[in-house]
Image: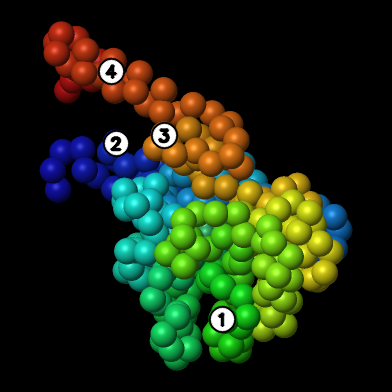
Amino acid sequence: MPFGLVPGGIFRCAAVAGGRGPRDVSKPKTILDIQKMKAAGEKIAVLTAYDYPFARLMDQAGIDIILVGDSVGTVVSGYDTTLPVTMEEMLYHTRAVARGTGQALVVADMPFLSYQVDPREARLNAGRLVKEGGAQAVKLEGGTNVAATIRAIVEMDVPVMGHIGLTPQSVHRMGGYRVQGREEAQARQLLADARAVEAAGAFAVVLEGIPAALAREITAAVAIPTIGIGAGVGCDGQVLVIHDILGLCEKYSPKFVKRFADVSGTIRRGIDDYIREVKAGDFPGPEHSF
Ligand code: KIV
């Protein structure tokens, strides 16, 4: 083994961290805990993660649910939409997140074409995200149109989170990323979608890009927790993309995003300093040399 590459050695923070996140690993959250939070009026905090270090940090901070979103396609892989994301990519990212998570519930997104064509294939792919990815639940987009698929997955004991409203995998049908449910007929359809998702057995549902009043109405109409993104404060919980809240994604910032930190600035300063010190011959110093 080359010098420095010893197990638990100097190159891997994972070795120091010790695998699964250290926070209350004896009691990882379940879908029942999440559902009890709605009943107790306790807000549910959800963030996306796509890798081990981010999962570990948010798990230690006490996040309730980590969503391995197919937004990985846009914020990590640089695609314009989530449509190109594959099952293999989702499995890779889900495994990394699961390894960094101790107490949060890990939900993995089902990517485009992994559940739309055939309920049997949907069951297989949902099962893979649990068996090979280490997720405790999966999420898929759609309402009444995917109710039978949700039921098929739930019947094999894989918990499902629904996702209605602005569903990014339907970007071409919607004609862009537009707020849904502004008109009465569309609002009634979204209420029907939420009820269909609940009746099919979903344990929670994401409400994305819909008017706050409609989100509040849906939240009151269903017994399962609603997790809002661009849906106002009347939902049972909130989800945002981690790159958005940390200011890591500068390409585009929707109105519903709040930046809680400017990590891009910190990274840029660190990289600038590194380049300057390497060019000047100031790094590595004697303290970094053997
Ligand atoms: O892919 C994703 O990150 C999502 C959330 C933003 C809801 O679906």
Residue at left 76%, top 59%? Answer: 214
Number of the front mark, 4 or 1: 1
Residue 250 image label: 3
Residue 252's quadrant in the figure? Answer: top left
For marks 2 and 1, give the CA distance.
48 Å
- Label 1: state its secondary structure: helix
Q: Which amino acid does label 1 sit on?
A: Val
To which residue does mark 2 refer? 10
Badge 2 local density, few (<14 within 10 Å), some, or many (20+)?
A: few
- In the image, taking residue 37 as reference, residue 2 lies left or right, namely left
Please state which of residues 139 and 24 is positioned toward the viewer in this rendering. 139
Badge 4 local density, few (<14 within 10 Å), some, or many (20+)?
A: few
Asked if disc 4 is less than 8 Å from ligand 1, the answer is: no
Q: Which amino acid does label 3 sit on?
A: Glu
Q: Where is residue 3 in the image (x, y as percent from the top left)?
A: 15, 38
Q: Which amino acid does label 2 sit on?
A: Ile
Residue 1 image label: none
Mark 3 or mark 2, which has the lower sequence index? Answer: 2
Please state which of residues 87 and 78 is positioned toward the viewer in this rendering. 78
- In the image, taking residue 147 as reference, residue 1 lies left or right, namely left
Q: Where is residue 181 in the image (x, y as percent from the top left)?
A: 67, 61
Please state which of residues 211 and 247 is positioned toward the viewer in this rendering. 211
Q: Can residue 102 be spotted in the picture?
A: no
To which residue does mark 1 refer? 146
Q: Where is residue 169 in the image (x, y as percent from the top left)?
A: 45, 65
- Label 3: state its secondary structure: loop
Residue 192 vertical position relative to residue 94 in the rendered view, above or below: below
